[in-house]
Image (spheres, rainbow, N blue to C red):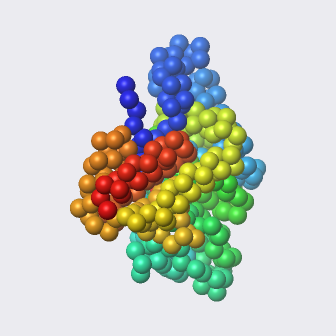
Amino acid sequence: MSRVYNFSAGPSMLPEEVLKRAQAEMLECGDSGMSVMEMSHRSKDYDKIIKGAEALVRELMNVPDNYKVMFVQGGGSTQFAMVPLNLATKHKAADYIITGQWAKKAAAEAEKYIKVNKVASSADKTFSYIPKTTAKDFSSKDEVDYCYICYNNTIYGTRYTELPQTEATLIADISSNAMSEVIDVSKFGLLFAGAQKNLGPAGVVLVIAREDLLGEPMEGTPTMLTYKTHADNDSLYNTPPTYAIYILKLVLEWIKEQGGIAAVQKVNEKKAKILYDFLDSSKLFKGTVVKEDRSLMNVPFVTGDSDLDAKFVKEATEAGLVNLKGHRSVGGMRASIYNAMPVEGVIALVEFMKKFEQENL
Ligand SMILES: *Cc1c(COP(=O)(O)O)cnc(C)c1O
């Protein structure tokens, strides 16, 4: 067996320790006599898993007591509808900042239900930066129910380092940076993350929401798309994605063993620096994002020649560095270096890039 360094944007690498633990517990988890996949979601054994996962989210992210932690299905994309359906009930309007495909999709989905103010966008330069905003760019909290951002832009490789100066309730998609850096939950009304980038396998979405926001949704909202349904039933209204939540719990235990999110963030900053420092010194490769807005998780880069990009991706794959092709909408390359990517993986990539540069310059 030889595991590769997988730079996929998602689903992406999981810590090897987690996979080994899951393997060891595949046939029997604890003394339950069965695999987690075979357990009733209402059983004592499973209750320990889902409650344990919630407790770890609260501990690691320092979630205040007046917030609910939920595990729901439908991927990050279903949140694009759930957010307006549940939270835009007063003014039926919200501010959106358009920083890439995911924010664009979220805004388009919200427009089906509410008035969307696109208060800023970086579309003019292919989303290679985070638009600068000031308080006066935003609607007042008497005009909108919330302001929506995509915290880390998985496709374009930008991230927020300073939150927008809105007085409205801030909502953020943290699918690709959840638990990669310290986030102050109390600054947000709601945060959500599809697990398959940084937290576990596909199939579960983590939602953290301030309790007072979880009232009645818009009329006609399906029961399953109502946050209150999941909040009131501890994510057990119906059968949750039991195995995905179990793996997520193992990942959270792993994060805790690393020293928590602040410790993981230090490693992520180190990994990103290794790669960005090389990109800044390279004569062949260059990063596509303005320096101050560079993501710690997703690093897009190009050679400027699409044939050479293709050659690089092909040869990297042969060297065990896989999934480096950029998103189909931008081309070039993208290295996703989530929590589970070890420092050695980034060093191996940079060494390979140096060699490729020598051979092709
Ligand atoms: C991947 C991703 C999504 C979409 O998630 P799905 O689970 O595929 O619906 C949304 N937002 C961000 C930031 C993402 O990276």
**Residue found at the far left of this picture:** 307
Q: Nearer the viewer, residue 177 or 83?
A: 177
**Residue found at the far right of this picture:** 65
Reply above or below: 166 against 343. Answer: below
Left or right: 181 in relation to 314:
right
Where residue 261 appears, x then y in whole percent? 67, 47
Quarter of the image containing the C terminus? Answer: bottom left
The image quadrant of residue 165 is bottom right
Where residue 54 appears, x then y in whole percent? 65, 40
**Residue found at the far bottom of this picture:** 136
Q: Nearer the viewer, residue 271 or 182?
A: 271
The image quadrant of residue 89 is bottom right
Residue in the picture at 54% in, 54% down? 274
Q: Nearer the viewer, residue 131 or 331?
A: 331
Q: Is residue 293 visible?
A: yes
Q: Nearer the viewer, residue 182 or 64?
A: 182
Residue in the picture at 45% in, 44% down? 348
Reply above or below: 288 against 49. Answer: below
Left or right: 109 in relation to 247:
left
Where residue 13 appears, x then y in whole percent? 46, 41
Where residue 276 appears, x then y in whole percent? 51, 60
Quarter of the image containing the N terminus? Answer: top left
For the image, the number of numbered tags is 0
Residue in the picture at 29% in, 47% down? 315
Residue in the picture at 51% in, 16% down? 28
Ligand 1 lies in quarter: bottom left
Q: Is residue 53 visible?
A: no
